[in-house]
Image (cartoon, grey):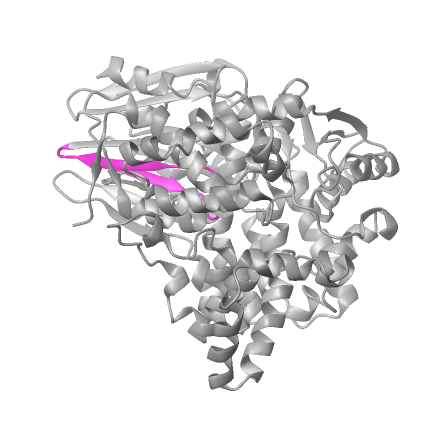
Amino acid sequence: MQSVARRMSDRLSHRGPDDDGVWSDPDSGVALGFRRLAIRDLSPAGHQPMVSASGRFVIAYNGEIYSHAEIARDLEARGVRFRGHSDTEVMLESFEMFGIKPTLERLIGMFAIALWDRHDRTLTLVRDRVGIKPLYWGRFGELFLWGSELKALHAHPGWTPEIDRDSIAAYVRHAYVPAPRSIYRGIGKLPPGCMLTLRPGDEPRIEAYWDARAIVSGAVRDRLDLSDAEATDRLESLLKDAVGRRLIADVPLGAFLSGGIDSSTVVALMQAQSNRPVRTYTIGFDEKGFDEAKDAKAVAAHLGTDHTELYVAPDHARAVIPRLAEMYDEPFADSSQIPTFLVSEMTRRHVTVALSGDGGDELFAGYNRYVVGQTRWGLIQRAPRPLRALGAAGIRSLSPESWDRLLRLIPSNLRRHASGQRLHRGAEALAHLDSAALYRAMVSQWKDPHAVVPGAREPHGVLWDATVQGAVPDFVERMQYLDLVTYLPDDILTKVDRASMAVALEVRVPLLDHRVVDFAFRLPPRQKLRDGTGKWLLREVLHRHVPRHLVDRPKMGFGVPVGAWLRGPLRDWAEDLLDPRKLAEGGLVDPAPVRRLWATHLAGTSDLEHPLWVVLMLEAWRRRWTEAPRVATAA
């Protein structure tokens, strides 16, 4: 049992190169394995798995608890004496003193926890509120497995997975497999804010200890009534505390700095609380439209940080691509995974912990699609229903490629982000006549997954839940909520976790402190999106530290020119992955629609790198991970 647990945990050595440990109880058939990235209490007193002082509880946990000092003081006042100063020990003793749920309510942090109760013979798995840390679990008969990544589960001799075609259908729409599913049948992701309890003889029971829907719907019913100045003061104070808590480490610490609103705010509040220059890190690209390094450098100079930048050659960036299927051990197709890995790799040469600005777009309405969606839905609502269907038919009468040719006749400053593909997505929503369809169209990579994955039945999760509109009536806030529970944990946080942990770098995300989440949704919409500009209030906080002219500019995605690369230096690589015979043999997608899209992209009439990247990453993943497992057909 111990040897198997060690083999599983060793598959995760990249996540924890500093120490390893295994604990087992042969009588109960339970084993916990752990790989440690030492951040707090670097001594043996921080070793995991850790047993509580009484011997009742055993824990293995990944993450950081930023409220552990307050909890420790409370426990010490009740007579608890600590062996070390790790947050693991504080949390473990709190579970014993106060119970699991009361402790979880007091935790500020990111975590994936496995807790074994030797007295009650109960296993509890817990994931943090917004899904910063991953946690997979699954059953194979009497065997129950869990781990931070699927790699660990692969190492168990009882691992007998089947690829789930229904999950593939969901993947080709979203470019990720939405929780609670995984790419395999019988294996799931524990949803954010949830705990799983397994007792002898029972089925696993999952319950939410923090319900994002209840939090958001309650927040929009209980609005804050603050002036702009008062709201700015409150947000700055809250963010200062969130950032300050995440500066505690016994190892070198720095921050990602893109020069955008989110990362600049985090760095500004770090520097305001530091008596020495904060270490900041940026990567740059020579390709026009993909480089933010100059903007980051200007912000760093103003704040006085110790700034490091690295201009990445295209060959270096492209060299990462063959490694992606290994890092992301289920299909994942956000191409910004490439620069995210590159900045993590560069940062890890200097520090062990980095703060990032992830979460600002979801909480403070920063995505362009919020403005676009609000505008489109307003126009749709004003149009009589018969005209909506007629308008959709009119848009569809021309191919996306034809629309692209027409749009080139319009000055670039007027057409902005318009494209034939986006017009067709809008037509889909127009034809369906509801805001949920509009949102789905805006976030879909392939609008008809069943055409690409024949025989599958796409699972319909929260994006099809008609009751969400009643819980969150405002369309922009509803998009924010849906992003909070889908795109944020399953795409953004997954991307950052795998890219950073591949090089043993811990990334902390202060904007996703759950207190900030609650505050952001209690703000009235006008304090988030104003005059077509998102993140209004967050900008007001930043402008107290950084001049407007350094940070107020159009939003730029964190990406690389994949579309051009696919027509050029990556063409042979893509041709091999998209070979129709090999796609047919793989059995995951229908080659015909994929080849049509590929031909259109190569012709240069439309940039279709996003849906193509979905298929490329799926096929790369299949070749790396799934030669042996059978593909399950839809029942």
Q: Position of 340 compared to 441: left or right?
A: right
Q: Position of 491 compared to 207: left or right?
A: right
Frontmost residue, 6 versus 445:
445
Q: Is residue 133 magenta?
A: yes
Frontmost residue, 46 versus 61:
61
Say which residue appears at 38% left-offset and 52% top-offset.
209
Q: Is residue 201 above or below residue 540?
A: above
How many numbered badges does the structure rendering display?
0
Please say whether residue 191 is visible from this viewpoint.
no
Q: Which residues are magenta?
A: 120-142
Residue 65 spot, x, y in % from top left: 52, 36
Locate residue 96: give its quadrant: top left
Residue 266 spot, x, y in % from top left: 71, 42
Say which residue appears at 46% left-offset and 61% top-offset.
440
Q: Is residue 475 above or below residue 592?
A: below
Locate residue 448: give its quadrant: bottom left
Q: Is residue 59 above or below residue 483?
A: above
Q: Is residue 394 magenta?
A: no
Q: Is residue 49 above or below residue 491?
A: above
Q: Position of 306 compared to 217: left or right?
A: right
Say which residue appears at 20% left-offset and 48% top-offset.
634
Say which residue appears at 78% left-offset and 33% top-offset.
274
Residue 321 spot, x, y in % from top left: 52, 26
Residue 40 spot, x, y in % from top left: 56, 24
Frontmost residue, 110 versus 547:
547
